Amino acid sequence: MSKQYYVESKPAAGGVISGNGMKADAKVAYVDDKPYEVKEGETILSLIRRHFGKGAVPTLCDAPNLEPFGSCRVCSVDVALSKGGPVKTMASCHTPVIPGSFIYPESDRVQKLRKNIIELVLTDHPLDCLTCEVNNNCELQEVAARVGIRDVRYPEGKTHLDKKKDLSHAYMTSDFSKCINCFRCVRACDEVQGQFVLSMGGRGFDSHIIKGMEVNFKDSDCVSCGACAQACPTSAISDIFESKSIQVDEKVRTVCTYCGVGCNLEVAVKGGKIKSIQAPYEAETNQGHTCLKGRFAFAFYNHKDRLRTPLIKKNGEFVEATWEEAYDHIATKLTEIKNKYGGDAIAGISSSRGTNEENYLMQKFIRAVMGTNNIDCCARVCHSPTAIGMQRSFGTGAATNSIKDIKLTDCILVIGANPTDGHPVTGAKLKQFAISGKTSIVIDPRRTELAKYATYHLQLRPGTNMAIMNMMLYYIISEGLEDKNFIEKRTEGYEEFKQEILGQNIDELEAICGVDKNLVREAAIAYAKAPNAMEFHGLGVTEHSQGTHTIMMISSLAMITGNVGRPGVGVNPLRGQNNVQGSADMGCQPYQGAGYFEVSDPVYHKKYEEFYNAKLPNYNGLKIPQMYEAALNDKLKAMWVIGEDMAQTDPNTHHVVNALSKLELFVVQELFMTETAKLATVILPASSFLEKSGTFTNGERRIQRVNAVVAPIEGTKSDGQVMVDIMNRMGYKQPELYDPEWVLEEISQIVPFFEGVKWDELGGDGKQWPVNKEGKGTDILHTETFKRGKGKFIHNNYKKSKELVENEKQYPYIITTNRELEHYNCGAMTRRTNNVLIVTDDVLMINPVDAAKHQIVDGDMVCVESPRGKVDVKAKITDEVKPGILSSTFHFPEVMMNNITSSVSDSEAMCPEYKVVACNIRKSKGEYKKPKATV
Amino acid sequence: MGVKLLLEHDKVEGIRYYDTYRKNGGYRAAEKALKMSPADIVEEVKKSGLRGRGGAGFPTGLKWSFLAKPEGVPRHLVCNADESEPGTFKDRYLMEFHPHLFIEGLLISSFALGSNTTYVYIRGEYAWIPDILEQAIDEAKNNGWLGKNIQGTGFDCEIYVHRGAGAYICGEETALIESLEGKRGNPRMKPPFPAIQGVWMRPTVVNNVETLAAVVPIINLGGDEYAKIGVGKSTGTKLMSACGNINKPGVYEIDMTISVEEFIYSDEYCGGIRNGKKLKACIPGGSSVPILPANLLLKTAKGETRLMNYESMSDGGFVSGSMIGSGGFEVLDEDQCIVKHTMTLARFYNHESCGQCSPCREGTGWMYKILKNLEYGKGKMSDIDLLWDIQRKIEGNTICPLGDAAAWPVAAAIRHFRDEFEWHVLNPDESQKRNYGLAHYADPIHVAASA
């Protein structure tokens, strides 16, 4: 708080105050003449609430996640500067406490004032409480009852009670006859989401909330985050699920299954069905905020398309089976294949959407029961280069810091990530950061939402991250901005690295990435000079042939500037899936087991064998792309997949489909009949996150409890139960009933950084690993030393992708892939919610220059052709992409964008290069046609 | 003839052009000030005892000394030319006819405060005045008084004229700042005060047009000499914009030693009540200050002659006094109906409430509705008490002083003219046909009981 000039402040009265347990020099203020300790800069409201509880002062415009606003004046209290001195009424929510002042929160005058204000508010409010959605959960109702309104003295007059409801939107609703003009929705839209859709139109009595330019929710720029609905104290803004109604049986706190932010959700259940979802304010990850996927996109869970019975493919047709039949079929086939071809003819792909416990059981099943290290998970296609790259540089392949550090940093560097679409809650925080005018650097081939607000946007050509990184490091070194102290004490390999960097040809790199070198220089200097700079990256870094190399360069960038190991700095991958961190932690990769021990290391091989009490192979297994190769070469005979739709999402669809079609046994655990499930020989119907318990580990290493909200849909089983059942069936004894508690207990014995994790002690906000024996988590890694001892500088030169080297002559365009806020990956879930009413199909972003060249107008179907195949997709003409660059999503199977993506992958981690595909475009001749790839 | 400092050259033809203004001693103060240190200028202004002419009368020098000066952060001077108080038009007069005096004041103040970018936020309805100001700014610039390296001192200053869009609330300094930033003109919470975080979160001083113009004579005369003019804490001269039922409405410069009676009746100023009518009441300082009945206007409750200055006008507090405010002097003769007059004001404040704080948003609406009922003979006795209750709940209970501004006229009208309101309730039909008239208000001193 700033100095207060116009009010003469008195020194704290007294000095030593006995009997209150306060420090002698503590500043005090008097509430009802009794002394209470004052915290520096706190408001009167915070003082009273701290000492007398949350409900001590009634409020209307105050909300837990918003800045004080001072408009309702219901929180007014009487304040005197000396005992018996003149009393002034002040709004307690935004008035700082003057030490030594005398505060009277319930004086007669204040009580009358509150009553009168509420009476005035009620003159323009429909008194239809009994039929209102928020009856008994309405802050106005509560405050009115509390201040004791008995009648309204005002005569009849003009009101706003005839305002029309807005039911235009897929989720959001409004009924402004119930609006009390508290501005909470406007502030939530501004301060929490940063979307600026809602604002106040008109003034005085005519003040009214408007959306965009006085349009309805549907036509506005609303991103449906629902923050306004949650902030609204009445039912003026709500949603189609009536999330504020208390007509529910119970509310269960759990964790969202969409992205790696790990938002906590409060799920309301009525009659065994999910009614609505809100975000708890006290949750550390999301503080009452979440996006439309977390808040609204849950209707998939009991969609009619849910698989409800096991299916076995017989003569090309799926036939319904019982669980027993399915298990028998699988067990027989697996035993047969194992005996005939050996365990290495079997492979498993676990799911980063599943819990830690399920991932752990899956890899244990594949390793201990099937006897192979052929276990991988969808991290392969997203953040595997991050894990490997950061392990090599730092020793740990996980985010070094926490999301809350955004509040503490001075500069953000966002590379290859579009967090406002992909990680909306973290994205909103980053956007707020950029909007506030602090230094923000975005490196992205697209002018993403964040790039529009950023101080520097380095709009590089796809696939040239390494060029930019080399340039930035060059400028930091040549400008003498490196943190010599940090480099000397904490790192190794610097001298060699420095020589490599200084040997770079900057002009050549400038030509490669297509970004003005002066801009790169300025950005590099801004990053290096910031007292604390925090780096975030996404799949725009990893899904490249040089993904792992780029990660190591990013790590070097952080080390060279000393931005590791304290609050507000670090290298922070924005994890794509809810538990992509956890699935890797649990050992769902072919070269490392649970806890990241190398399977080929004799010490750990022995340790694992003893722990699992089974014979394990001591060599690495197959990564996902290698599995396809092996299947095509008849080396792989059986595959077990949990909840991944490779046929739609893995690159080069034809190749994937051909491989999967050759398998003798292909077990798929799924919620829906996805493109992959269609290729299965056995489908096991799985339960969704709302129907099971366990833990997810979010992008900041936070292990959080997922709690079953409803019972599994009839006929389905959780992935964990299936794993337990099949292990028991195949003679590897496990407790009959899957329960995360015992699995977690087992995990804590093998994974060192889970040592102190106990199911009962995780609480609402979970713990960030490593969790020590005493159960204490860690919010910042590498504070004293790096996990690997010293941080290592590893240099690589930019290398052009094989895809471009081979194909750019015939296919001069580059198409890169991106995500839309409204849909999640293959869309199996989000396409079965009202989200499809908001975003209905994949679109191809194309620069106006290119569009003109090919006579393409907005909405035309465009044929995109690559060496692998071609797809037809609707054009969206936009300057978000530079000429020569195209971008599209792959949420919809109707387009099958991955028909054209390539099999080129990261040299180290084999993460596919989704982001650089050589292609050509032309206007489609015919009407929209369905691609023929799917079987 | 009283002392004339601002309107000294009022009768000089062409004074609004640079050459004439310069020939008549214009920019002499600027010449002098640019040779002084900024701190010395602030000191002179402090010594002068100048009080803000916008209405609140806060000491200008003190306000300037609050301005935070963090390293590397630009500071701004913003002139509040959003003169929207009904009955007030002195700033318009200054800007329209003496633009160079105003710009000279802006320049000196900008120099004193270290503002390289100074804004004039002008009322949207003053549609023609920005042209006059911009022309004058160009002239000043061409003659080296604005722009880069002013008069070789190394000081840079640009003045921008920003038009408001027609909102009374934007005369409130924080709402003005919001509006200047391009946002909806809603007042901000204080603290932080503009002196710490104002325009674009930078330290900002917001001053009224007349206040800044008064800096010119202060520099010319010296702070001490300026302070000798006037009486007590009412130093210097004040512009009054007189209107209503008087013979000579207009803008007058007074030296704050004259009596209210002299101001109304002397030929030098208002020239008496029009058509030989009797004085009924007066709002001495712009529509938001309390209305006074004739007896309390001319003499204080203690029986002393009321003078046209800050102290004397507010003698007796709100019980029997008022405020000099913005200098909008509105005179009502015996034919005026206080209820209707109050209703008109309530309608204005209802229209102008920004709607942020609930007491003002809802309260101003109901005050207007109830006053309308009373005026049109549909009122109840209890309505008068309800009206009193509403204004009590608005006053002091809003983010900005507009709440007070809306409450005071209603409060004062009921306090001093309650019988006229009651007459309206008791005589619904008659009140539609004739006015209550003068009643006892012009009688010799009668001390109104506190309500």
Image (tube, coloured by chain):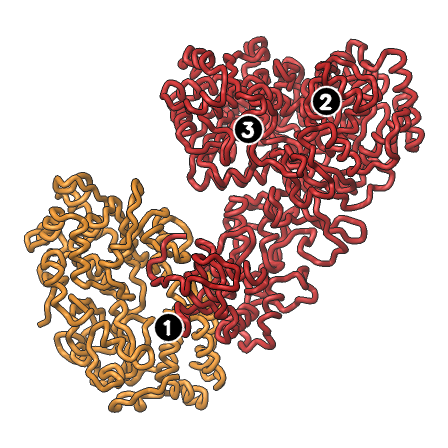
Chain colours: A red, B orange
Query: Is residue A700 placed above or below B145 in the rendered structure?
Result: above
Kind of residue at badge 1: Leu
Q: Nearer the viewer, mark 3 or mark 2?
A: 3
Q: Residues within 10 Å of mark 3 (few under 14, many from 20)?
A: many
Q: Is residue B117 left or right of residue A255?
A: left
Judging from the image, what secondary structure is the residue with disc 3 in? loop
Whether labels 3 and 1 belong to a single chain: the reply is no
Q: Which is nearer the eye, A402 or A642? A: A402
Question: Disc 2 residue type?
Answer: Gly
Q: Is residue B441 above or below residue A99?
A: below
**The C terminus of chain A appears in which quarter of the rendering?**
top right
For badge 3, the amino acid type reads His
Total of numbered circles in the picture? 3
Residue A549: in sight, yes or no?
A: yes
Residue A11, given in percent of the width and then of the height, sits at: 37, 62
Instruction: Name the residue tied to disc 2.
Output: A593
Comparing A756 with B102, the one in front is A756
Badge 1 local density, few (<14 within 10 Å), some, or many (20+)? some
**In 3D space, how far apart are the residues under numbered discs 3 and 2 (Cα atoms)?**
23 Å
Chain hosting mark 2: A
Q: Are marks 3 and 2 in contact (CB under 8 Å)?
A: no
Pointer 1 residue: B345
Determine the residue positioned at 85% across, 20% down: A665
- Residue where numbered disc 3 is placed: A782
The answer to which of A564 and A250 lies nearer the viewer is A564
Residue A561 rendering spot, x and y as whole percentages: 44, 25
Report how far apart the C-alphas of labels 3 and 1 lie in the structure.
67 Å
In the figure, A283 relative to A518: above or below? below
- Of helix, strand and loop, which one carries label 1? helix
On screen, residue B138 versus residue A874, left or right, reads left
